Image (spheres, grey):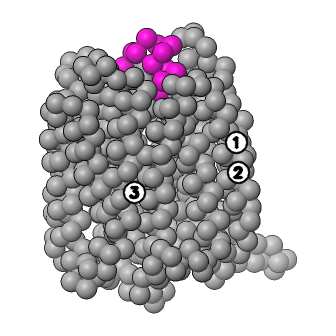
Amino acid sequence: MNLTYSQLLKGNRNFRNLLWGQVISELGNWFNFIAGLGLVRVVSEASPTAAGILFVCRLLPFALVSPIAGTFVDRFSRRTVMIWSDLIRVALALLFLFVTSAENLWIAYVATALLSTLGAFFEGAKNATTPNLTGKDGLLAGTALMFSSRFLLMAVGSALGGWAAAIFGYKVAFVINAVSFLASAFSVWLIPEEATRKKESYELRISRDETGKIKRPSFYTELKEGLHYTVRNHFALTILILNVIWATGGGAINVVFERMGGVFFAGKENWNPDIAVALLWTAGGSGLFFGMMIAHKTATVLERKNNHNSFIGWALIIHGILFAVAGYMPSLWLFAFFTFISRAIIGVEYAVQETMFQRSLPDHIRGRISTLDRGAELTVFGLSSYLASISMFHISPQFLTVISGILSAIAGVVWFMRQGRSNSVYTVAESKLETS
């Protein structure tokens, strides 16, 4: 049985604290992102290369550090990792205040890269903790709430960030980001240490010598264990391949929104660039939030019909086609509408896919596998963002949008090639987890 959203929130204080911490920090993150993007646009005189570098600094460090972060949070206190990640990011968020010209634009790049690095540790700990806080019955609702709140904040935070940047200037947004990390650290601090990890899964990983000193596999051994599990487990490898293929097109969305909103429609329809970009992120975030909110009912139907695989494959294909069609919409509002529908479809798909994935992973290795998957996806996502920014010297942002949609849709084809229409692989994985 899958708990409803209200059942999980009313009956689980620890999950509420984790969710609240994410809501606060995500709001600040989007203030930072819109303001940082606008700041780079201003001081670089709207250079697409400068924007591309910022995207890479935001995504690539997270991707590269994720496997290490995943091993780290499986070995040490997940609660402590989240708290210190937040506290250090308070100081890092304020570094943007020192960016005043193209000569010190490097500060924005360094600050973004360091925020991304610490974010990898926080996300790894949070993702590994969530299934323990929700339990199996609450995992679908917990996954949907975690990601829907993030996507809602993408909509609300980007809109408010664009508005604050346009009215008050960029510095206000950077200060708000710093304060949000402090509030998030306090929220995580309220969660008991023992709630973040299954005690029995931790004890299976350690032993004691004759003096009573704790012994456990080395950091490198546990890192390799995560890699081997992903490669040898068909379902885990399928998820990784799927997300990497999707990211080849999905990574371009940063550049698509920045060029279509901040340059193309800003010039064609006389939009304020910051507000136009924020509107597109708002449309995307609203669509993802809506998709996550209907994921519970969708999953209920899919479980009754045992039809998860067909749904995931077709959802990926259709969402990509719709985004490609958006590329040649004649107005910003129509572009935003197609973006909303496309993101709503992928929002439902991701909630179903991620719940299947998390349920298949043992607790003692969950941090490593989830961060490895996320890291591989974001590596390609970051490279795709940079290549997309370079392509702006040769193709139009409309054509880039079409390419982005088509590449993302190919992920659905790859899913069918790996999984077919049967749910047998997932069922076997889940049954093994239940009996372990």
Q: Secondary structure at mark 2?
A: helix
- Residue drawn where x is 38% and y is 86% of the image: 431
- Residue drawn where x is 16% and y is 73% of the image: 421
Q: Three-letter amino acid code at disc 1?
A: Val
Where, by quadrant of the figure, is residue 96 drawn? Answer: top right
Which residue matches tag 3?
289
**Percent x, y for residue 252?**
30, 36
* CB within 8 Å, label 3 to label 2: no
Please indicate whether residue 217 sits to the left or right of residue 234 in the image.
right
**Percent x, y for residue 159?**
46, 39
User: Mark 3 or 2 closer to N-term?
Assistant: 2
* CB within 8 Å, label 2 to label 1: yes
- Residue drawn where x is 49% and y is 20% of the image: 40
Q: Three-letter amino acid code at disc 2?
A: Ala
Which residue matches tag 1?
179
Magenta stretch contains residue 42: yes
User: Local crowd at mark 1 within 10 Å, few (<14), some, or many (≥20)?
Assistant: some
User: Mark 3 or 1 closer to N-term?
Assistant: 1
- 303 w.r.t. 330: above or below: below
Q: Secondary structure at mark 3?
A: helix
- 312 w.r.t. 157: above or below: below
**Percent x, y for residue 399?**
17, 30
- Residue drawn where x is 34% and y is 23% of the image: 271
Which residue matches tag 2?
183
Please indicate whether residue 65 sits to the left or right of residue 77 in the image.
left
Q: CA distance from mark 3 to mark 1?
A: 24 Å
- Write the start and end of the magenta stretch as one range: 36-48
